[in-house]
Image (tube, helix red, strand yellow):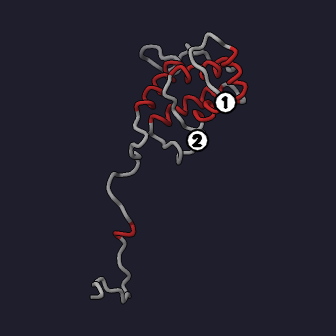
Amino acid sequence: MPSTDVVRNGTKRRRFIEEMFRLYRAAGSPALREIEEWIRANDDLKGTASTETIRRILRGHVPPRWHTVEAIALAFFAASDLEPGQERWTDNINEPFSNMDALRQAWAEAVEEDPAASDPRVPNNFDDPWATAPRPAASNFNDEPPF
């Protein structure tokens, strides 16, 4: 799982990566080469993914195509006890929401999120400690120009 320095908490991208890691861990954290081979062996998938693509996603990248995410997720499902159509939240009182629905929603929101969006934990005001630092009390420094 990428650190919060790489993918900040509270972002939609973080939620997507957490969903992917949940599936990856449920699959037993398989080698990325095994996932790639499973995807290549299944010709009926609409998407494909190399080991590098899988690695980048698990490190915080959000791919622009759903079919890539779907292929990786189906490989994780195949290696785990989870099912794509299985209820994601057992205490959900609304309409059924499957594991694949949760992943697709997280992906769609992450794709739409502005990667340059400000951190929600930091106020949007300018704070420059060098510009606002108080001047030392015992200083002979004069702000007047030398001419």
Is 10 or 111 nearer to us in this picture?
Answer: 111
112 left or right of 60 in image = left
Q: CA distance from mark 2 to mark 1?
A: 17 Å
5 vs 10: above or below = below
Q: Amino acid at mark 1?
A: Thr
Residue at 35% from the left image edge and 52% from the top image edge: 123
Residue at 70% from the left image edge and 15% from the top image edge: 41
Residue 51, labelled with which disc?
Answer: 1
31 vs 147: above or below = above
- Pick the quarter of the image with the C terminus: bottom left
- Pick the quarter of the image with the N terminus: top right
In the image, residue 103 lies at what x, y percent?
Answer: 51, 24
In the image, residue 88 lies at what x, y percent?
Answer: 53, 20
Residue 2, labelled with which disc?
Answer: 2
Task: Choose the circle earlier in sequence order: 2 or 1.
Answer: 2
Say few, some or many: other residues with alpha carbon within 10 Å of mark 1 (under 14 / 14 to 19 / 20 or more).
some
Q: Amino acid at mark 2?
A: Pro
Quadrant in the rendering for residue 78: top right
Is 8 or 43 nearer to us in this picture?
Answer: 43
Furthest residue toward front: 147
